[in-house]
Image: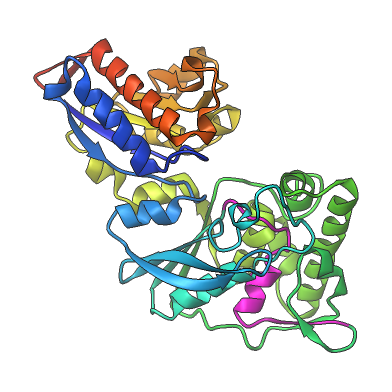
Amino acid sequence: MRILLALDKFKGSLNASEAAGALAAGLGSGPGGSNVECRFLPLADGGDGSVQAALAAGFTPLTVQVSGPDGTPANAILAFNGTAAVIEVATTSGLQMLVPGTLAPLSSSSDGFGQGIAAALGHGPRQVVLALGGSATTDGGAGMLSALGMRFFDDSNRAFVPSGGTLKDISYIDDSGLVPLDGVDLIAANDVQNPLLGPDGAAAVYGPQKGANATEVQLLEAGLAHLVLRLEEAGLPAAECARAAGAGSAGGLGFAAMLLGARMVSGADFFLDLLKFETALAGCDMVITGEGKLDTQTLAGKLPVVVARRAWPVPVIAVVGHNALDVKSLPDYHIEAIHSLESMTRRDSSRDPELSADLLRQIGARISCGHQLTQGRLHT
């Protein structure tokens, strides 16, 4: 019985490889364990964990120094395989880089993400993958653009690196020094469709998650609109990019990436392609997928649903930390069953790696006990 363990991270507790390892241990301990062969394919959907997934697939780590979202120097890891580089927002300009309990909705910057991109370009990749998830800032990508050579000036002709709270201070923009991207396939991987501005935009929808109160959301919205105006004056198609689906991802980094010519793609599908999902699936009798949470957003095209769609007709089981879905809808998405950690404990497993690993081992054993594995076939 060949089982493909194709999981994303369990945010706050286990990365994708750790979660798969715990499940595999449980599968091997059940009555059919001696007949189980587990294949590991750690996955990501464009959020944090994308670099780790690429490394697990054979990419080489590159360590670079960046300025974190609050300006604190930090070491970030990129993934590179000789032709493609993967850089994620979460570990260059992400919420996880701030001091716990301290958010910076107006003062944080995406400068570090731009520094990571610049470092990757120095290795001559033909493709650069921007994993847009986990951003701490709502600066419309101005910090990233600044790190890549765009210059922003205030009313006194002083150059500065804008943050969300200082976008309003941009008097004019000079893009003549932008790093050349000729011959580079720039990919923006994300799983949201929000535009940059308006009630469904970056500030209104995601600003509060980054610590912005109602007044600050209005300031951020006005700053983003001002940024679009100044970029238009500089001769860039900012208004068009601002309206595009996905422009509001990662605090407007999707918008800035599109200004640079990036292709916006589904993070889940792209990473399944990058990590050669179909190759790993070949010959498997079952797939176990999952992540920290399964809810209505998952049905809009997040990783577990995409895995199930692409694995069909191979049976798929989902293992998650929290499940908010009606199991009656699962057959429509080719998911046969859901096992959730929260149903097994009153404790918060999302903050407890040991507990999460133990529960995953128990679920693995339960799956093994619930199926008879003989001659490479699955019998329920």
Task: Tell me if residue 130 can be seen.
Answer: yes
Comparing 258 with 35, the one in front is 35
Q: Which residue is at a point 79% across and 69% down the rendered structure image?
A: 227
Q: Which residue is at a point 23% across and 45% down the rendered structure image?
A: 279
* Spot occupied by residue 55 in the image (x, y as percentages of width and height): 33, 57
What colour scheme governs how the chains and residues are painted in the rendered image of this protein?
rainbow
* Spot occupied by residue 315 in the image (x, y as percentages of width and height): 30, 23
**Is residue 139 found inside the magenta-colored segment of the image?**
yes
Q: With 16 as the anchor, is 100 left or right in this view?
A: right
Quadrant, the C terminus: top left
In the displayed structure, 26 sits above or below 137; it is above
Task: Tell me if residue 244 can be seen.
Answer: no
* Spot occupied by residue 92 in the image (x, y as percentages of width and height): 56, 63
* Spot occupied by residue 309 in the image (x, y as percentages of width and height): 39, 32
In the displayed structure, 262 sits above or below 201; it is below
Q: Which residue is at a point 72% across and 44% down the rendered structure image?
A: 209
Q: How many marks?
A: 0
In the displayed structure, 195 sits above or below 34; it is below
Toward the left, the furthest residue is 375
Point out the stretch of residues depicted in magenta.
133-154
The part of the image, by quadrant, that contains residue 132 is: bottom right
Q: Which residue is at a point 44% across and 36% down the rendered structure image?
A: 353
Q: With 161 as the anchor, is 351 left or right in this view?
A: left
**Is residue 189 found inside the magenta-colored segment of the image?**
no
